[in-house]
Amino acid sequence: MIDGPYFVLITIGVLAAGLVAGVCCAFSTFVMRGLGSLPPAQGVAAMNAINRAAMTPAFMIVFLGAAVLCAVLAVVTVVLWPDDGKAPLLVGSALYLIGVFGVTAMANVPRNDTLLRMDPGSPETAVYWRAYLREWTLWNHVRAVAAAGAAVSYVLALT
């Protein structure tokens, strides 16, 4: 049975991964579709505004805090936890660190940075916008599933 501070850390991990899964799910299921229904210049301007607004302490504490927490849980699990209980904790940490944080850094942020440098009203941006919507959303689906999987893995570790 997991108890004490380790229980608290895992419970916070469940909550943080679940919150990130919810944000990603919202983007995958309706935000990107709504942005895609706008004329390209408006969609690009709106997405750029969203990406700038996401850099708030509240969101970054949840998103980056979850990554730090997952890394701490992975290290503590490897060092202190008996072999029979390690799998769900390590799977949860890997899902978040690779499937959420890694995908964000390698797939979503570079696309956001490219979009931010473009003139929203240019024909080149309109072409890029269609590819951006498709590719960014695909990678966001990966993040949503990975974050949800991390939350489920942590819950399984507690049971």
Image (spheres, grey):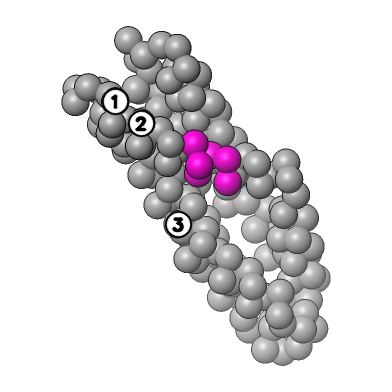
Q: Give the range drawn in magenta.
A: 64-69
Name the residue located 55 percent from the left edge and 64 percent from the top edge: 108
Mark carried by residue 76:
2
Per the image, label 2 sits on a secondary structure element best described as helix
What amino acid is at disc 2? Answer: Val
Mark with earlier residue (2, 3): 2
Task: Tell me the amino acid under the disc marked 1.
Answer: Leu
Look at 32% across and 30% down and name the residue there: 77
Q: How crowded is mark 3: few (under 14 residues within 10 Å), some or many (20 or more)?
A: some
Marks 2/1: CA–CA distance? 6 Å
Q: Which of 74 and 141 lies nearest the eye of the viewer?
A: 74
Describe residue 57's horizontal placement relative to residue 144 as left or right.
right
> In the image, is 54 to the left or to the right of 97?
right
Q: What's the residue type where badge 3 is placed? A: Gly
- Which residue in the structure is indicated by mark 3? 102
Q: Do the residues labelled 2 and 1 touch (CB within 8 Å)?
A: yes
Verify CB contact (< 8 Å) between mark 3 and mark 1.
Answer: no
Which residue carries the number 1 mark? 80
Q: Is 134 one of the magenta-colored residues?
A: no
Packing grade of label 2 (10 A; few <14, some 14-19, many >=20) is few
Q: Which residue is drawn at 63% across and 84% down?
A: 127
Of the residues tagged 3 and 1, which is closer to the observer? 1
